[in-house]
Amino acid sequence: MKQSPHASGKNLNLRAQVVKTLLAVQNGQSLQSVLAQHMNIVSDKDRALYHELVLGCLRQWHSLKQLTLPLLSKPLENQVVETCLYLGLYQLLCTRVAAHAAISETVDACKQLGMESLSGVVNAILRRATRESEQFYDVLEQAPGLPSWLSKRLKKDWGEQLAEISYELKQLAPLTLRVNNRQVSRDEYLDILEDEGIAAHRCEISDVGIVMDESLHIPSLPGFEAGGFSVQDEHAQLCATLLPNLDDKFVIDACAEPGGKTAHILERYDVKKLIALDQDEKRLKRLSENLERLVLAGDHVDVVTADAIQWQSPELADCIVLDAPCTAVGVIRRHPDIRLLRQSTDIQQTVELQKQILENMWQQLKVGGTLLYITCSILKAENEQQMVNFFSTHADAQEIKIEADWGVEQIHGRQLFPQVGHGDGFFYCLMQKTA
């Protein structure tokens, strides 16, 4: 009996394993949900390459698509073969993999996945790419690299910045740490890294942030087990710096997982009570483990599994941090599968969800209390427009202007864009309840 092309991965080569992972994402599964399972089949020595090929192909997906279409006399309408083509071209144009290995291994993968009859097409196009690599590379560089619906939306929101935003979203995001000031200062930790021969430098706008100059295995960094630092994007680190003094205050972190903001608040302030709220129990477990590692857990911290649309607080809060669910377009550099998973129809649903959570959380806030609204999106519908609508329907809400030299001031709030060597796309708006 002939084995199905998508059967057990044990006898497939590395490129075929990569194609299977990319097919899972094309069929709507998030990379996070399939990565561990797919990674288990790959041998230890191949894991770094597997990881690079999967993430790299996703990052360049729409550019590779734009490059490939004119090379075909007629559309293939075959997911497996198209994915093999993208993978082959990515290796030839964006990695140091030897051309002969990239071609032969990718053509073999095409055969192993049951597409022997079309493997000649893959072979021919990849060979052409080695002959015309400069022209191919130019097309790849100039392609916006975003799904057309997102390009249109960003053009509408940020016309003049579109080319720059598209370019930034294709780049690699830096590995950024947030030092736990209860244990070590930033300068002390930089000295520790230097003593270990690990290159790193200070973040520019976060006063507790460090950018690593090389990608390293996080748990092997000095002080990890003892809770000396967390991994957190530089622009996400700004959250705690925008809040009023929270010493002896009651704080709610709504939509709290994975817990970076919760931990940062606890590192910075001696709160009376903090409730970290999220509806994903599994991820909240990770949040609790992180607080334990950072030596921040205690009776004053409650981790609660609940839906922020309906949840009622036991008492009114002095401060609420609402990192609202969003399309996550601002963090595409770290999660390149978003390019394939997100659809234009998601925006309206997300905006409605944000509105419902904001509405409920506003009811849980004391008069005189502050709410910080955050997203990791760069779409105005989820950010500026959401705030315009909120303020127009809530006479008891007053914006507290964020005076800062980072980001772009909006009608309400400030917008940060992803930047090479710096943070991701984030939006912040701070408000006070006046009645």
Image (cartoon, grey):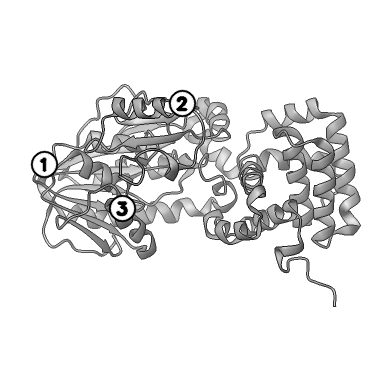
Can you give x and y, in whole percent of width and height, for residue 286 in the image? 36, 57
Q: Which of the labelled discs sits on residue 247, or is there none? A: 1
In percent of the image, x 44 and y 40: which residue is there?
Answer: 379
Residue on which disc 2 sits: 199
Disc 2 residue type (three-letter): Ala
Considering the image in quadrants, where does the N terminus appear? bottom right
Q: As drawn, is 307 to the left or to the right of 343? A: left
Q: Can see residue 73?
A: no
Which sits earlier in the primary sequence, circle 1 or circle 3? 1
Q: Which of the labelled discs sits on residue 256, or is there none? A: 3
Q: Nearer the viewer, residue 408 or 149?
A: 408
Q: As drawn, is 169 to the left or to the right of 112? A: left
Q: CA distance from mark 3 to mark 2?
A: 31 Å
Which sits earlier in the primary sequence, circle 3 or circle 2? 2
Can you give x and y, in whole percent of width and height, for residue 422 in the image? 44, 28
Disc 1 residue type (three-letter): Asp
In percent of the image, x 27 and y 58: which residue is there?
Answer: 277
Q: CA distance from mark 1 to mark 3?
A: 19 Å
Q: Is residue 160 above or below residue 279?
A: above
Nearer to us of marks 1 and 2 is: 2
Crowding at mark 1 (Cα within 10 Å: few <14, some 14-19, many 20+): some
Image quadrant where residue 283 sits: bottom left
Q: Nearer the viewer, residue 394 or 215?
A: 215
Q: Residue furthest front?
A: 195
In percent of the image, x 70 and y 34: which residue is there?
Answer: 94
Q: Secondary structure at mark 2?
A: loop
Q: Is residue 49 above or below residue 110?
A: above
Q: Is residue 416 above or below residue 229?
A: above
